[in-house]
Amino acid sequence: MTATVAAPTRGGSLLVQRSLTARGIEVLFAAEVTHRHRNPRDDAALLALHPGRPG
């Protein structure tokens, strides 16, 4: 089971992913993605996380 949540921040996005392993261990991963040096290949991923947000 995996759940990912994205929230816009001042300079990018905060991504938090919660996973549950087969043995029932909860794993949390958090990262801030900044938009300062944007890579056009990442635009599709950002739009998927923020569907109504312009690229």
Image (cartoon, grey):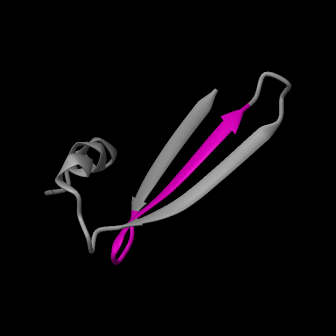
Quarter location, residue 24: top right
Q: Does the magenta stretch include residue 28?
A: no
Q: Looking at the rendering, in which quadrant would you find the C terminus?
A: bottom left
Name the outermost residue toward the bottom: 10
- x and y percentages locating residue 13 in the rendered image: 39, 63
Q: Looking at the rendering, in which quadrant would you find the N terminus?
A: top right
Seen in the picture, residue 14 relative to 23 is either above or below; the reply is below
Seen from the viewer's position, the closer of residues 22 and 10 is 22
Q: Does the magenta stretch include residue 12?
A: yes
Q: How many marks?
A: 0
Seen from the viewer's position, the closer of residues 50 and 42 is 42
Seen in the picture, residue 48 relative to 24 is either above or below; the reply is below
Bounds of the magenta segment: 8-20
- Magenta stretch: dominant secondary structure: strand
Is 8 left or right of 30, judged from the image as shown? left
- x and y percentages locating residue 17 in the rendered image: 58, 46
Identify which residue is drawn at 59% across, 58% down.
30
Identify which residue is drawn at 51% across, 42% down.
4
- x and y percentages locating residue 3 in the rendered image: 56, 37
Name the outermost residue toward the left: 54
Seen from the viewer's position, the closer of residues 27 and 37 is 37
Is 9 left or right of 53, judged from the image as shown? right
Quarter location, residue 33: bottom left
- x and y percentages locating residue 51 in the rendered image: 23, 45
